């Protein structure tokens, strides 16, 4: 990657490098949070993710889009989505690397950090397969609300192999689980849902229901089961386990109407479905379906942060690789001051996003009062900020490539198209900012505890302390005044946390550059206005090894 540019000035593909060992921020996080027992496996995964074979697999999964087959040749309703073999390779990779279950099959708290590292790397190569994989992982604590069902399904959830067969789950060694929550009339306002669930009696796994209605987004339809939100006659919105095949082996009447023509990845299938009396069993308390399924969303919001941090890393590395190997106006791009300033700003963004994502993952493995407060307040804040920044950074990285970035045959098109999804899925930006205010209102002590901790970290950094004191003062204002400021508050909170994490774990040069740039009045609207340091080349060197 450091050789003299190719004679025709076309940059060679970045391939056959180790995604893990070349990322000093990630490797340091694994050591810091006590997940070093996973180092050898992460090194193996890093080589796998950076290999030419993995890159070609990801391209094929994206190029050969899934096909919906609603009926068999004889007219039987089958609602089957056919995938290219590359998709199943990506799913198998995600499964064996731990994305579907690692924090639950390994009881060490640092398993959340090890899991986070894998998802962060996987998202850099093939994002589509992360959707059903992370939803499967996030479904596990929700399924545990039904002890009999959870006991039956656990061996299939814990399995590390991918089984692509479309057969009843009882006949499979492993399974995937998706989510069916939103409807066309409501979107994020799930209280307006109309899907209904009629009780049909008691079964071996609890109260059974026939579910009828429509789901506007049903991801991913070939999962072996979905957690579905529907209203019962007596109690209202409740959460149900709805398998693709009924326990008796017959097909559950879940009719796929169409596959969504998404802006982002084409490898995964998102769908619109109708349920015609589909068999389901109650999870959790009847009438408490929204908080039940939101528990699943809390875990997938962490995944949004990890995935977007991975995308930022991938965008930065691709841009830096290109700039090191491309000549324009007589000099390498990397040697041109304005380009170096832009790349330095991107390096800071990547480092701060990775620190925030991995720190948040570590908090999911702990239940100290501070960690609980941190999760409630920072999960939506980090999702808002890191996912938003991924959109901006992937766009800038594409621009580094110029016209070579604006073609689907290179790496940037797919990355750029995929970046916005994490801001939208599991709650858009405004929803996340309102969730920050809601968490602060419900648990005022959370804000006090988190800000007190940050002020302690910033004891010798007056610029950060000033920003934190502004937050302390803001949160003391009446709630009615805060809602219009929700985005400003959330952005400031995320930046302060990133600065504090750099103070604790970053190099002195990167920390100084981050604080100098992020709290500069001119920073923000355009990436690359300032990298906050005169030593930009050193900053770039320390971010990619």
Image (tube, rainbow, N blue to C red):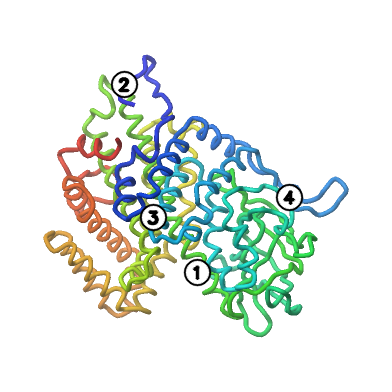
Residue position marked by numbered label 2 in the rendering: 3
Q: Residue at x 16, y 48 (%)?
A: 508
Crowd band around label 3 with a 10 angstrom C-alpha radius: few (<14), some (14–19), many (20+)? many
Residue 512 appears left or right of 490: left
Q: SS of the residue at dot 1? A: helix
Between the C-alphas of marks 3 and 2, the distance is 35 Å
Whether 393 is drawn above or below 337: the answer is below
Q: Which mark is residue 113?
A: 3
Marks 2,1: beta carbons within 8 A: no
Q: Say which quadrant the C terminus sits in.
A: top left
Circle nearer the N terminus (2, 1): 2
Marks 2,4: beta carbons within 8 A: no
Q: SS of the residue at dot 4? A: strand
Between the C-alphas of marks 2 and 1, the distance is 49 Å
Between the C-alphas of marks 3 and 4, the distance is 36 Å
Measured as percent of width and height from the top left, residue 236 is found at 62, 80
Between the C-alphas of marks 4 and 1, the distance is 29 Å
Residue position marked by numbered label 4 in the rendering: 80
Q: 519 or 25, which is in the foreground?
A: 25
Circle nearer the N terminus (3, 1): 3
Circle nearer the N terminus (2, 4): 2
Image depth: mark 3 or mark 4 in front = 3
Whether 83 is drawn above or below 352: the answer is above
Measured as percent of width and height from the top left, residue 325 is found at 33, 25
Q: Which mark is residue 295?
A: 1
Q: SS of the residue at dot 2? A: loop
Circle nearer the N terminus (4, 1): 4
Between the C-alphas of marks 3 and 1, the distance is 19 Å
Q: Which residue is drawn at 26% across and 75% down?
A: 448
Q: Residue at x 33, y 68 (%)?
A: 371
Q: Which residue is drawn at 62% across and 70% down?
A: 229
């Amino acid at each position: 990657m450091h050789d003299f540019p190719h004679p025709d000035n076309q940059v060679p593909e970045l391939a056959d490098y180790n995604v893990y060992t070349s990322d000093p921020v990630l490797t340091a996080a694994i050591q810091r949070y006590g997940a070093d027992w996973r180092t050898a496996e992460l090194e193996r995964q890093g080589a796998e993710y950076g290999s030419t074979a993995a890159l070609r697999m990801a391209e094929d999964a994206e190029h050969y889009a899934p096909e919906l087959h609603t009926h068999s040749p004889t007219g039987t309703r089958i609602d089957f989505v056919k995938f290219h073999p590359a998709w199943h390779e990506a799913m198998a990779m995600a499964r064996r690397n731990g994305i579907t279950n690692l924090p639950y099959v390994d009881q060490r708290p640092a398993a959340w950090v090890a899991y986070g590292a894998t998802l962060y790397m996987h998202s850099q190569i093939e994002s589509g397969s992360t959707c059903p994989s992370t939803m499967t992982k996030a479904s596990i604590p929700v399924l545990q609300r039904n002890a009999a069902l959870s006991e039956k399904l656990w061996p299939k959830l814990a399995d590390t192999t991918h089984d692509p067969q479309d057969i009843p789950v009882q006949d499979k060694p492993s399974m995937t689980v998706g989510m069916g929550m939103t409807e066309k009339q409501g979107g994020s306002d799930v209280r307006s849902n109309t899907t209904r669930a009629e009780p049909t009696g008691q079964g071996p796994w609890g109260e059974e229901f026939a579910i009828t209605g429509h789901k506007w987004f049903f991801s991913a339809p070939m999962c072996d089961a979905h957690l579905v939100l529907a209203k019962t006659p007596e109690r209202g919105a409740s959460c149900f386990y709805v398998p693709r095949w009924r326990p008796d082996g017959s097909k559950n009447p879940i009719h796929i109407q169409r596959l969504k023509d998404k802006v982002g990845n084409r490898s995964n299938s998102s769908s619109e479905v109708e349920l015609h009396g589909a068999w389901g069993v109650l999870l959790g308390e009847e009438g408490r379906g929204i908080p039940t399924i939101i528990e699943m969303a809390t875990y997938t919001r962490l995944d949004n942060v990890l995935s977007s941090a991975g995308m930022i890393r991938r965008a930065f590395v691709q841009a830096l690789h290109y700039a090191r190997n491309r000549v324009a106006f007589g000099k390498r791009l990397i040697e041109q001051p304005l380009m170096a300033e832009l790349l330095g700003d991107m390096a800071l963004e990547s480092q701060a996003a990775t620190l925030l994502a991995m720190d948040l993952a570590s908090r999911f493995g702990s239940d100290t009062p501070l960690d609980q407060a941190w999760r409630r307040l920072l999960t939506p804040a980090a999702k808002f900020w890191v996912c938003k920044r991924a959109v901006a950074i992937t766009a800038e990285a594409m621009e580094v490539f110029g016209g070579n970035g604006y073609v689907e045959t290179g790496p940037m098109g797919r990355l750029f198209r995929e970046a916005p999804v994490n801001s939208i899925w599991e709650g858009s930006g405004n929803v996340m900012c309102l969730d920050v205010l809601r968490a602060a209102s419900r648990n005022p002590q959370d804000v006090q505890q988190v800000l007190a901790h940050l002020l302690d970290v910033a004891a010798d950094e007056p610029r950060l302390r000033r920003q934190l004191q502004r937050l302390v003062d803001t949160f003391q204002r009446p709630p009615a005044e805060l809602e219009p400021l929700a985005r400003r508050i959330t952005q400031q909170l995320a930046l302060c946390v990133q600065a504090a994490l750099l103070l604790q774990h970053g190099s002195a040069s990167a920390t100084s550059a981050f604080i100098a740039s992020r709290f500069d009045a001119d920073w923000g609207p355009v990436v690359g206005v300032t990298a906050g340091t005169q030593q930009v080349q050193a900053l770039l060197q320390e971010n990619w090894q």
